Amino acid sequence: MTEGSAEAVPPAAETMAYAEPRDVAAVRSFVRAAAVERGLAPTRADLLVLAVSELTSNTLQHTAGGGVVRLWSDDRRVVCEVVDGGAARSFGQMPSSDSHRGRGLAIVTRVVDKVSTSTGPDGTVVRVQMDR
C-alpha cells in the first residue's frame, strides 16, 4: 500500500454514486461488468468486486453522505477508486482470530494487486488496481 497524491483520473473513467446499503449490489454489478468489459478475467473481476464491496460498505457504515466509485483501465490494468468524505483508512494487519470486526480492509490488501490511499478536494480516495 502506498499513500500520497494519486495520478489523475482519466476522462474516460466510468462513475457510479452510492448512498444507501441497497446501492452496494448495484455497485458490485457495475464494477464486475465494467472490469470484464475492459478485459479483466472474470475470476479477477470477482476479486475486484470483493474489494470494492468492502470499501463501499465501510463508507456506508463509517461516514455520512455516501460516495462515488470510479473505474477505468489502461493497457496493463483495471483501476477502481472509492471516494468518500470519511477519514483516511488504515490498511494493516489481519486482526486476531478472536476479534469480531476489522478484517475487511486487511482482506482488500490481499485480493488486489495494489492499494493506495490519498486525500484531496474530493475527499478520501482509496484506489485499488488489478493487473491483467
Image (tube, rainbow, N blue to C red):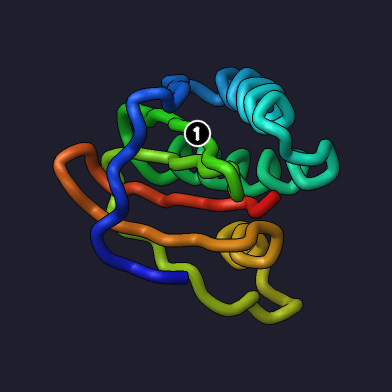
Work out whether residue 19 can be spotted.
Answer: no
Give the vertical position of 106 relative to 26 (above or below): below
Where, by quadrant of the figure, is residue 104 drawn? bottom right
- Residue 76 lies, in percent from the top left, at 60, 49
For residue 118, side relative to residue 67 (left or right): left
Where, by quadrant of the figure, is residue 50 drawn? top right
The three-letter amino acid code for the residue at tag 1 is Trp
* Residue farthest toward the left in the current orientation of the protein: 121
Work out whether residue 122 can be spotted.
Answer: yes
| Residue in the image at 67% along x and 45% along y | 48
Give the vertical position of 6 relative to 57 (above or below): below
Instruction: Describe the element under mark 1 as helix, strand or loop.
Output: strand
| Residue in the image at 41% along x and 23% along y | 12
All told, the count of numbered labels is 1
* Residue farthest toward the front in the current orientation of the protein: 75
Q: Nearer the viewer, residue 101 or 124?
A: 124
- Residue 89 lies, in percent from the top left, at 39, 60
- Residue 78 lies, in percent from the top left, at 58, 42
Residue under pointer 1: 72
| Residue in the image at 58% along x and 79% along y | 93
